[in-house]
Each structure stands twice: as C-alpha cells, then as structure tokens.
Image (cartoon, rainbow, N blue to C red):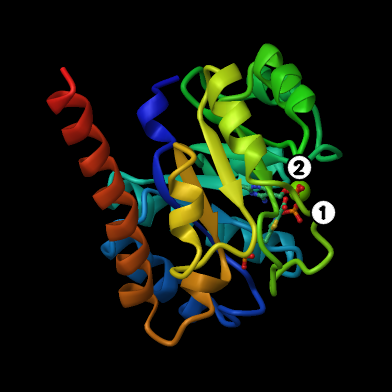
Amino acid sequence: MNQLQISGIYAITDPNLLTSEQQLLDGVAQALAAGVSIIQYRDKQATQAQKLFRAKAITELCNQHQAKCIINDSLSLALAANAHGVHLGQTDGSIAQARAALPNDAIVGVTCHDDLQLAIKAQNEGASYVAFGRFFPSNTKPQAKPAKISVLFEAKQQLSIPVVAIGGINQHNIDQIIRTGVDSIAIIDAIFGQNDIRHSAQQLVHEFLAHEFNHSTNERSLG
Ligand SMILES: Cc1ncc(COP(=O)(O)OP(=O)(O)O)c(N)n1
Ligand SMILES: Cc1nc(C(=O)O)sc1CCOP(=O)(O)O
Ligand SMILES: [Mg+2]
C-alpha cells in the first residue's frame, strides 16, 4: 500500500449535515475541489439502495480528483461500490476478512481510540492506517472517548503505517494536531457543517500543506 494514499485532510460525510443526496454530492465535490485527499462515506441512516448509489457516486467523484473514497463500517458496501477502502471500528469486522476480500491495494483503516497497543495489533494484522481520537469535544459524536495528543507522538515513533487523528478538529486547533507529525486529519463538522464548505476545507488544506512545506524546508536546511 502506498503510504502517500493516506495524507492530508480526510473529510467524513454526515447525513445530519448533508441532508439530501444533492447536498451530499455537492458537498463532497466542494471538498474535493478544495484539495481534500480522502472522503469517507459515513451514513448510518440511508437505505441499502441509497447507500450503494451514494457510495458509487462519491467513489466516481474521488476518481475524478485523484482522491480516495473510503466506506465507513461496511466491507460489503465498499466491495459493491468498488470504493478505495473501508474504515473499521473495533466492532465493525476483522481486518483479515477485509484484506482477503478487497483488492491488494485497497485501504483498510482501523479505529484505535487512545490505545497504542490496539494500533500495534492492527498494524500487525494488515491495517493500512490507524485512527486515534477524539482530541477535542465533538459536536458530531459527543460520546466519543477522549484521547490525549501525546498518543499521536508515541504512535508516530512506534508505528510504520500512517496515523490519522480525529475528533473536534477545526481551523482553531488543527495546528496542535499537525505539529505531532500525523499523516492525515479526519474532520466532519469543520468542513461539512460550515456554510462555505469549499472555503472551510481550503483553509484546513492550506494549514496542512504549509506545515509540510516548512517541515521539508527545515529538514533540507539542516542537511
Ligand atoms: C478516520 C476515522 N476514524 C475513526 C472513526 C470512528 O469509527 P468507529 O469507531 O467505527 O465509529 P463510527 O464512525 O462507525 O461511528 C471513523 N469513522 N473514521
Ligand atoms: C466519527 C468519529 N469518530 C471519532 C472517534 O473518536 O473515534 S470522533 C468522530 C466524529 C468526528 O467528527 P468532528 O470532526 O465533527 O468532531
Ligand atoms: Mg464504525
């Protein structure tokens, strides 16, 4: 799996914010136009038929932008939609089963909350990336378990697969997360909950790219 596949701003859809199919596809198109690298289709409300249509449409939009479409929770939906991968929570199914069913280059992401041991286990079982969170209170998922930012520094030292941060991240606090060196930052409300989705996503993408640029310039000047 190419590690560069999991890099930059990772936007996750929410049916409470993008309430119609038109809003969903327009919102995803705006986020992609702003330079978001990954879209996760996360929908616990639609019918199976609606989910399949929407997952296929988002995958197609991602293909047009050289971005990746990851399906939340459902391996079967990821397969049916020919999406680029699946995101599995701790009770959403096994990594081995997803790896066996999906193409070799597919992305399998795994939620690890604040637990580095879960992340090491996921890496050993074939995960493409691990996600830690939540780092700040989340309007979207208020019940999400808190995690300390220090786990991200530890994860970057101990893991070889990409590390994703999630939960309550917005333009005011993203810098604290970027500084840990994480590969990607997953966001719902600060992108899809905003009036101007494209502009909001653009600001977050620029923050991330500015840090990457400064980091590589410093490394070059230090030799
Ligand atoms: C990138 C990313 N990280 C974490 C999650 C949360 O997954 P999960 O614990 O399965 O919870 P739900 O999203 O299914 O409510 C995620 N979806 N994406
Ligand atoms: C879906 C999800 N999972 C989380 C976790 O901690 O595992 S936090 C979260 C919600 C992220 O949305 P927002 O950017 O609006 O806070
Ligand atoms: Mg899940």
Q: Quadrant of ligand 2?
A: bottom right
Residue 168 location in percent, x, y? Answer: 62, 65
Q: Amino acid at mark 2?
A: His
Q: Is residue 16 left or right of residue 114?
A: left
Closer to the camera in the image, 175 or 162: 175
Quadrant location of the N terminus in the rendered image: top left
Q: Quadrant of residue 206?
A: bottom left
The disc at residue 145 is 1
Residue 67 location in percent, x, y? Answer: 35, 46
Q: CA distance from mark 2 to mark 1?
A: 7 Å
- Label 2 residue near ligand 2, CB within 8 Å: yes
Query: What crowding class fits label 1: few (fewer than 14 Cα within 10 Å), some (14-19), or many (20 or more)?
Result: some
Closer to the camera in the image, 77 or 107: 107
* Residue that extends furthest to the top in the rendered view of this protein: 124
Instruction: Work out whether residue 129 can be spotted.
Output: no
Closer to the camera in the image, 102 or 179: 179
The disc at residue 215 is none
Quick check: 197 above or below 181? Answer: below
The disc at residue 113 is 2
Q: Are marks 2 and 1 in contact (CB under 8 Å)?
A: yes
- Label 1 residue near ligand 2, CB within 8 Å: yes
Residue 93 location in percent, x, y? Answer: 81, 33
Residue 145 location in percent, x, y? Answer: 82, 54
